[in-house]
Image (cartoon, grey):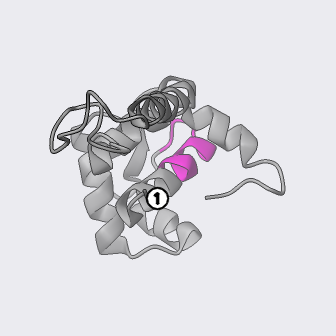
Amino acid sequence: MKLSTKTRYGLRAMIDLARCDDGLPVPLKEIAARQSLSEPYLEKLLGLLRRSELIESVRGVQGGYRLARPADLITVGEIVEILDGPIRFSDCDTGRGCQRRETCPAGGLWTRLQAGIEQVLSATTLQDLVNDGNHPEGGI
């Protein structure tokens, strides 16, 4: 399982906004430059996040983007779901495409792994990532 570039780049942009969260909008150009991302691609990602009400856009000369709510109230799980949809480690827990669901000795493992992934994503906030990023080993 690998997260898409859409999710990784979108998460980087959200962390960037959280680090600049003084209430002032941050221009797209600045986020793109700091994160080494293409402006058109970043604009598409921020559009998805704006439509999902995680960020707000401000028009005009002093315009840009800002978080719609505090960084400690936005989870990584929300961001991932908006940009990539639900993360599914396997289809075992849904029953789709698995003929051996009832007898598979690994089924419990996949179910626990899925629950663990969901728990970590829903328990981790943008603020947690900003705080972790203040350490030399932090980064995405």
Q: Nearer the viewer, residue 108 or 46?
A: 108
Q: Is residue 59 visible?
A: no
Q: Nearer the viewer, residue 139 or 98?
A: 98
Q: Tell me which residue sits at (68%, 57%) in the image.
A: 139
The quadrant where residue 55 appears: top left
Q: Tell me which residue sits at (48%, 48%) in the image.
A: 14
Q: Is residue 114 visible?
A: yes
16 part of magenta stretch: yes
The quadrant where residue 129 appears: top right
Q: Position of residue 8 (x, y in %)?
A: 46, 58
The amino acid sitting under disc 1 is Arg
Q: Magenta span covers which residues?
A: 14-24
Q: Which residue is mark 1?
A: 8
Farthest residue to the front: give it: 103
Rendered view: 71 above or below 25: above
Rendered view: 27 above or below 134: below
126 part of magenta stretch: no
* Crowd band around label 1 with a 10 angstrom C-alpha radius: few (<14), some (14–19), many (20+): some
Q: Nearer the viewer, residue 54 or 95?
A: 95
Element at label 1: helix
Q: Tell me which residue sits at (43%, 37%) in the image.
A: 106
